[in-house]
Image (spheres, rainbow, N blue to C red):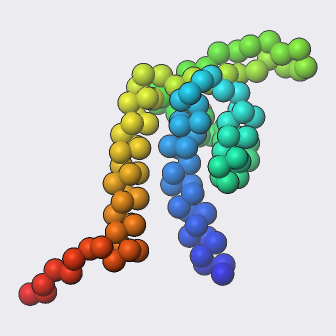
C-alpha cells in the first residue's frame, strides 16, 4: 500500500538521527561503516541521506571527526560521539523507550478506558 510505505518511510526518518548516533557511540566510525551498521539493522540509508545528518550532528556539537590517511584512496573522515552527543543520545533513547512503550500499550490494548464525561 503506497500510503503505508510513505508513512513507514517518515517514521524511519524520524529515528534515523538517533540510530546514527547509536551506531557511532561504540567506536569511531567511517561513513561506510555507519551505513553497514544501519543496513544490518534493516535501516537502508544512502550516503546522500547520511552525510547531511553527520554534518548537522557535528555542527550541533554531538559528533567530532578526524582525518586518517587511506592506503586505498583519499583520506577518510572518522566520526566519534562527543560527551554532549552521548547525553543527547541518552535523552533520545529515553524518549524512544517511552514512545515505544506507549505505542505497544495501544496495540496490546493494555490501556484502561477512561470514563467519558
Question: Outermost residue, right direction?
Answer: 72
Q: Position of residue 7 (x, y in %)?
A: 56, 70
Q: Is residue 110 above or below residue 71?
A: below
User: Hey, which quadrant is residue 88 in on the image?
Assistant: top left
User: Residue at coordinates 38% horizontally, 51% vertically from top-left?
Assistant: 97
Q: Position of residue 13 (x, y in %)?
A: 56, 55
Question: Outermost residue, bottom direction?
Answer: 117
> In the rendered view, does 24 fall on the left or right side of 45?
left
> In the rendered view, does 109 fall on the left or right side of 52?
left
User: Residue at coordinates 35% horizontally, 45% vertically from top-left?
Assistant: 94
Q: Position of residue 65 (x, y in %)?
A: 61, 20
- Name the residue nearer the viewer: 77 or 29: 29
Q: Is residue 58 visible?
A: no
The mark total stands at: 0
User: Residue at coordinates 70% horizontally, 22% vertically from top-left?
Assistant: 77
Q: Is residue 23 visible?
A: yes
User: Hey, which quadrant is residue 54 in on the image?
Assistant: top right
Is the N terminus in the top left, top right, bottom left or bottom right quadrant? Answer: bottom right
Is the C terminus in the top left, top right, bottom left or bottom right quadrant? Answer: bottom left
- Name the residue nearer the viewer: 96 or 73: 96
Question: Outermost residue, left direction?
Answer: 117
Q: Position of residue 45 (x, y in %)?
A: 69, 49
Amino acid at each position: 500500500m503506497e500510503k503505508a510505505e510513505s508513512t513507514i518511510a517518515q517514521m524511519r526518518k524520524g529515528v534515523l538521527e538517533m540510530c546514527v548516533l547509536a551506531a557511532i557511540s561504540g567506536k569511531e566510525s567511517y561513513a561506510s561503516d555507519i551505513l553497514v551498521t544501519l543496513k544490518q539493522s534493516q535501516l537502508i540509508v544512502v550516503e546522500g541521506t547520511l552525510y547531511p545528518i553527520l554534518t548537522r550532528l557535528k555542527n550541533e556539537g554531538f559528533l567530532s571527526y578526524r582525518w586518517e590517511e587511506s592506503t586505498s584512496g583519499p583520506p577518510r573522515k572518522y566520526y566519534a560521539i562527543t560527551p554532549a552527543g552521548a547525553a543527547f543520545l541518552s535523552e533520545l533513547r529515553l524518549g524512544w523507550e517511552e514512545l515505544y512503550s506507549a505505542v505497544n500499550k495501544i496495540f496490546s490494548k493494555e490501556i484502561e478506558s477512561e470514563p467519558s464525561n
